[in-house]
Amino acid sequence: MPVTRRRAAAAATAARVVVQEEERDAAIEISSDSEAGSEWRSSSSAAEEDSESGEEVDISDSEAGDGEGSVEESEEGSGAEAEQLGSDRSEAACNKIVGLRRSGRSLEGIKLVECKAYLKKNGLSQTGDIAACVDRIVLHWRFKDGDPERIYPRSSFSINCKGDVCRGDAVLFKQKVYEKSGKRHAKCIGKRIVAGKVTKESYGREKQQHTFTIQVFWSKGAGKLPPLHLLLVKGRNLYRMMTFRQPWANEAERLKVLEEKHSRGDDARRVRALNRPKSAGNRCGANIVLP
């Protein structure tokens, strides 16, 4: 069939329509990819913000495992490689500490992240500064080779400190143990004696209640606790029955720590006294009848 001008023009028009449709489809695909990319970037930045704003961060985990893995990797296997690399560093840190302890050398100069890697591997608490973590590692080695109750015998807690315990005290106390029922008035299942060291004490912001963190040496009785377990005890429960401590090598140093604690205690009592009249005044004002 001969090609006329009209048919040639129609064919050219159809070709242009096809090209325009292809270009439009290509443009749509490009815009779709760009949206997906922006969504990935926004979710990545959100993940970074969440990781930065997190209240609790486990240093040992971040050092030993993920590296920069707070945001998902786009390439498969890169996260596993980073985790493997972190695992190797953790293993090297543990071997380093084991070597130092076996040779009888001190852990002076050891890094905090290395201490936390060792503590994590052995299922121990990783909280505290470098001094607290080193002390925990040393105790772990002492308790591995000996009985904690023989290392810290009951007779060594010879000073009655009921009502006045401070950070750094090695204490022996008795407390009631309650069943874990989730109820406010739980059933008492017995009593236990706990020996340990006060690693931290603080007054709460809302109610100014005094709370002690005790690293357990040994315990006896109901609900026996493992060595080096961290136990939170309110002051009124710590002092309720009996509380004894070991003498310090330098009691003058203890007086300084005690003085600082008393200063914070005075501040907490002032805050509590200021909060009480407000609530009491509101209750009294509700009973006043104006003429």
Image (cartoon, grey):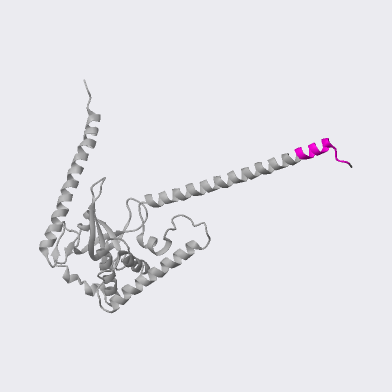
Image: 198 above or below 37: below
Residue stretch rendered in magenta on the structure = 2-13
Q: Is residue 148 above or below residue 285?
A: below
Residue situated in front as seen by the camera: 188 or 267: 267
- Count how many numbered circles sit on residues in the image: 0
- Image quarter hosting the C terminus: top left
Quadrant position of the N terminus in the picture = top right
Identify the residue at the far left of this view. Answer: 252
From the top left corner, tell me how far across and down residue 76 is, in percent: 53, 61
Quadrant assignment, res 212 = bottom left
On the image, the x and y values in percent for residue 264 come to: 18, 50
- Please tell me which residue is depicted at 47% across the width and 65% down the height of the picture: 81
Instruction: Assess whether residue 12 is covered by the magenta stretch.
Output: yes
Residue 41 visible to an observer of this rendering: yes
Q: Is residue 161 left or right of residue 84?
A: left
Main secondary structure of the magenta stretch: helix
Q: Is residue 190 above or below residue 92?
A: above
Q: Is residue 256 above or below residue 206?
A: below
Residue that sits furthest to the front in the current view? 5
